[in-house]
C-alpha cells in the first residue's frame, strides 16, 4: 500500500485513488460522452494560481458545444480564501452555475486570470 503524504491532510494513497478512478470508469466508461480526465499544462494552472487572491481551485463539469457536437469538459476556476470564485459568476435560470468561456451559459469573467478550459481531454488524449 502506498503511503499518504503526511504534510497534506487531503491526500489519499495511490491504491485508493486508483480504485476510485477505476470505479468511475466502470460506471461511466460506456457512455459515448465519457470524459476520464483532462490534462492542463503547468502554464494554465500558474495563470490561475498567480492571481494575487488565489488560495485554491474548483473544477467544474462543463459541456462544450461546437456546431452539432457536444463534448464534456472540465473548467478550472481559482478561489479566494473564502472559497469564492475569482470570476464574477452569473447564475443560470435553474440557479446552478454553468461554466462557460464565451458559450453563453455561465461565467462572465472580470478577472484577468482565474479560469482555464483549454485542456486536452481523455479520451482521446490519454497516456
Image (cartoon, grey):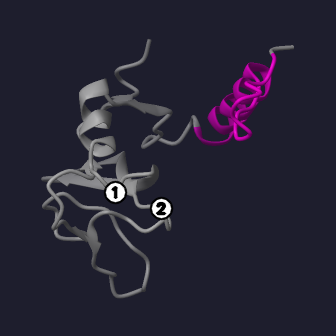
Q: In this image, 47 relative to 31: left or right?
A: left
Question: For residue 6, what is the image quadrant?
Answer: top right
Q: Which residue is mark 2?
A: 81
Do the CB atoms of the residues marked 1 and 2 lie less than 8 Å apart? yes
Task: Note whether 111 is above or below 15 in the view shown.
Answer: below
Rendered-image quadrant of the N terminus: top right
Q: Position of residue 82 (x, y in %)?
A: 50, 68
What secondary structure is found at the residue carrying circle 1? loop
Task: Note whether 50 is above or below 92 in the view shown.
Answer: above
Q: Position of residue 83 (x, y in %)?
A: 49, 65
Q: In this image, 31 relative to 20: left or right?
A: left
At 12% from the left and 53% from the top, the residue drawn is 67
Q: Nearer the viewer, residue 34 or 105?
A: 105
Image mark for residue 10: none
What secondary structure is found at the residue carrying circle 2? loop
At 17% from the left and 70% from the top, the residue drawn is 104
Start and end of the magenta stretch? 3-28
Name which of mark 1 and mark 2 comes first in the sequence: 1
Image mark for residue 53: 1
Q: Nearer the viewer, residue 72 or 87?
A: 87
Rendered-image quadrant of the C terminus: top left
Residue 41 visible to an observer of this rendering? no
Amino acid at each position: 500500500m502506498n503511503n499518504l503524504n503526511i504534510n497534506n491532510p487531503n491526500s489519499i494513497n495511490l491504491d485508493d485513488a486508483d480504485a476510485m478512478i477505476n470505479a468511475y470508469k466502470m460506471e461511466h466508461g460506456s457512455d459515448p460522452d465519457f470524459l476520464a480526465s483532462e490534462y492542463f499544462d503547468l502554464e494554465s494552472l500558474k495563470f490561475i494560481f498567480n492571481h494575487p487572491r488565489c488560495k485554491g481551485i474548483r473544477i467544474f463539469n462543463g459541456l462544450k458545444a461546437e456546431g452539432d457536437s457536444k463534448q464534456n469538459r472540465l473548467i478550472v476556476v481559482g478561489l479566494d480564501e473564502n472559497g469564492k470564485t475569482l470570476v464574477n459568476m452569473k447564475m443560470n435560470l435553474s440557479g446552478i452555475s454553468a461554466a462557460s468561456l464565451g458559450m453563453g451559459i455561465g461565467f462572465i469573467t472580470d478577472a484577468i486570470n482565474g479560469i482555464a478550459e483549454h485542456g486536452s481531454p481523455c479520451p482521446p488524449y490519454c497516456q
